[in-house]
Image: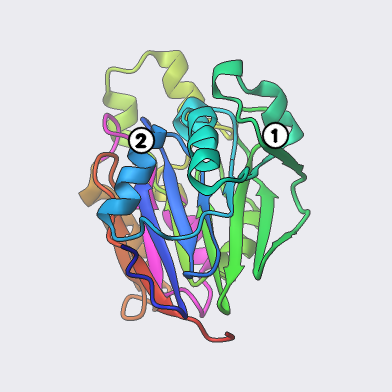
């Protein structure tokens, strides 16, 4: 049974990491998933575990075609259709759709363009470009209940656009993928190290901290450190980078920080709606 309060914005990171990513954003009247890189069974089970089993799912927002972000899409699409009696749209760019493998392509695809805002019920869905080594990747900003929620992962460098989007957020799920020293001293082959640290790879702790410090807005209340590498990062190092950035920006007292996990969903973050 859902525990949603009727005017609360809730964000639940169901999974985050190199093996699968999925985040729920909703308010009890409308809701979306951002990515579905874990199995459909796990998506629904983790929602149930958090008391969100009855939470509305009106769309799935796909960031790009890598399996850890879209691997469960085809089965989840079918499961939602069977459960709800209607097709739930999977929103993605044309480049992402064209790059998907058949076994992961959902039946209900709706194309979006970076920079083109989508209205869904009372939600505003804003896909924006990020630098990553895939066809046409986006991050997503979701506006509901007077708040902006962003899921920003899989980018190789901070950009002015990303910084501007971050500045508007009340809740940010932000990539802190790797620690530079652990990556360079680790066992990965050189070509993979080069890919990860490239301008179209993944953010290091230092890069994410710099982005946070420069893009911190007055409305930010919750920060989730996301997409941490099991091999090339440690939660303590990511936390140190994030808390240091918040301290330098004078925001340590007002921003709560959590680290997302691969195998265990985080308890939902809740903010009261301010423009119901």
230 is higher (above) or lower (below) than 271: above
Whether 215 is among the magenta residues is yes
Number of marks present in the image shown: 2
Q: Which residue is mark 1?
A: 136
Where does the N terminus fall, quadrant-wise?
bottom left
Whether 157 is among the magenta residues is no
Identify which residue is drawn at 75% across, 58% down.
Answer: 117
Left or right: residue 111 compared with residue 226 = right
Which x, y percent locates residue 62? Answer: 59, 41
Q: Nearer the viewer, mark 1 or mark 2?
A: 2
28 is higher (above) or lower (below) than 43: below
As helix, strand or loop, the secondary structure at mark 1 comes to loop
Left or right: residue 86 compared with residue 261 = right
Left or right: residue 64 compared with residue 178 = right
- Evaluate whether residue 179 shows in this view: no
- Viewer-nearest residue: 125 or 106: 106
Q: Quadrant of residue 10?
A: bottom left
Identify which residue is drawn at 58% across, 54% down.
Answer: 58
Look at the numbered discs 1 and 2 and tell me whether their residues touch, using CB distance below 8 Å. Answer: no
Q: Which residues are magenta?
A: 208-233
Identify which residue is drawn at 64% across, 30% down.
Answer: 107
Q: Which residue is mark 2?
A: 41
Which x, y percent locates residue 72? Answer: 46, 31
């Amino acid at each position: 049974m859902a525990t949603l309060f009727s005017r609360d914005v809730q964000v639940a990171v169901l999974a985050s990491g190199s093996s699968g990513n999925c985040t729920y954003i909703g308010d009890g009247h409308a809701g979306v998933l951002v990515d579905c890189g874990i199995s459909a069974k796990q998506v629904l089970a983790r929602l149930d575990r958090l008391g969100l089993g009855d939470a509305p799912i009106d769309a799935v927002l796909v960031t790009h075609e890598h399996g850890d972000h879209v691997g469960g899409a085809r089965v989840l699409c079918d499961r939602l259709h069977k459960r709800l009696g209607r097709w739930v749209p999977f929103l993605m760019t044309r480049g992402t759709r064209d790059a998907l493998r058949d076994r992961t392509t959902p039946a209900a695809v709706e194309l979006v363009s970076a920079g083109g805002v989508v209205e869904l019920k009372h939600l505003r869905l804003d896909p924006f470009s990020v630098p990553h080594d895939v066809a046409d990747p986006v991050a997503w900003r979701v506006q509901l209940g007077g708040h902006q929620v962003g899921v920003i992962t899989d980018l190789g460098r901070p950009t002015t656009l990303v910084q501007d989007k971050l500045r508007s957020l009340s809740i940010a799920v932000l990539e802190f993928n790797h620690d530079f020293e652990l990556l360079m001293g680790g066992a990965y082959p050189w070509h993979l190290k080069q890919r990860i640290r490239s301008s179209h790879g993944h953010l290091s702790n230092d890069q994410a901290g710099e982005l946070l410090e420069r893009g911190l807005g007055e409305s930010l209340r919750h920060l989730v450190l996301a997409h941490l590498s099991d091999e090339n990062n440690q939660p303590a190092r990511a936390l140190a980078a994030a808390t240091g950035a918040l301290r330098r920006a004078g925001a340590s007292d007002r921003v709560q920080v959590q680290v997302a996990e691969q195998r265990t969903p985080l308890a939902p973050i809740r903010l009261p709606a301010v423009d119901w």
